[in-house]
Amino acid sequence: MILNICPNPSIDCTVELEQLNVGRLNRIANKTVTYSGKALNSAIGISRLGGDSYATGFMYENDGNLFVQRLDNEGVKNTFVWNKGSVRINYKIVDNKSMLTEINDIGERVLKTKQQELINLVSNISKNASVVVVSGSLPQGVDDAYYPALLNAVKGNAKKIVDTEGEKLLSSLSCGVYMAKPNLSELEGAVKCKLETKQDMLKACCKLIDLGCQNVLLSLGRDGAIYTNGSTSYYCKSANVAVNSTVGAGDSMIAAASLMIENGAEDGEILRSAVAAGTASITTSGTNLFYRDKFEEIYAKLKVEKI
């Protein structure tokens, strides 16, 4: 079973415009609303690939039942720590050039007692997990040290995967993390320098490995991804597809990678599956993620090379 921990769920409202005109009237061409959160998206992706998926995290009394319904419909088992208030609403604006502009809400404040409740819940559920994914931002009232606290609460021999940024990422790496998944911007932020070449990127990935994690999956958007353990590294280029929305592509990569890790796949296959899922995801609108048939179609076209 793969446990997915979502500290900060969101209602994602994706609006498509012909062109984003700042300071002027904009008319919506299309709108998609989904009940999301990075780890919840990963949980759904795992289930769509046939994996045994479980979701937990913080949830809110207003609108929270809609998240539960979505997970139930996708075959994802779930248990949450419930809080008063409403789920935050994030706005994703996509123009005719597929340029994404995001406006993320801060969400409700989570009390210390609720934070401890989730740590206790993770400690209990993770006993039956082979892989644990922690991803996304944190709600109000929760500081960056909560990421290591969640990871240290994991019991047994589950392989831990982290997808976040800044101090949350850096402080997590020494907590027995099996794989970190930054995108290029997040990696540049972590090492505090611009990364131009693949060799620059590999050196930066190795800095994360030096801080404690075993592997790094570096997402490069349309250019594909890199997977490295510090001594052996692979690159996989994305397939050319029509882009509808890049929202959720990274979460889809986590979904496929975590399932491959659970199955004991080799590094090259972990990378190939991750890129296939991420690429399949951008062919759908909003945060609808990917579907298995599109994943398999793209997976068959991809090649992995050693670098």
Image (tube, rainbow, N blue to C red):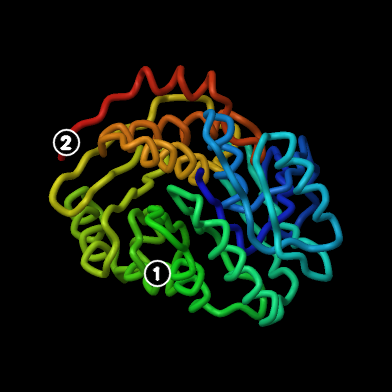
Q: Is 104 above or below relative to 242?
A: below
Q: Dividing the picture into quarters, in which one does residue 193 lie?
A: bottom left
Residue 89 is situated, as x and y percent measured from the top left of the image, at 75, 58
Residue displayed at 45% across by 72% down: 148
Residue displayed at 27% across by 67% down: 212
Please tell me which residue lies in front, 30 or 156: 156
> Where does label 2 land, which residue?
306
> Where does label 1 land, which residue?
172
Mark 2, Cα crowd under 10 Å, few <14 / some 14-19 / many 20+, is few
The label number, if any, that marks residue 193 in the structure image: none
Residue displayed at 60% across by 32% down: 244
Tag 2: amino acid: Lys
Horizontal placement of 207 versus 262: left or right?
left
Marks 1 and 2 sit apart, C-alpha to C-alpha, by 28 Å
Task: State which tag comes first along the sequence, 1 or 2.
Answer: 1
Q: Quadrant of the C terminus?
A: top left
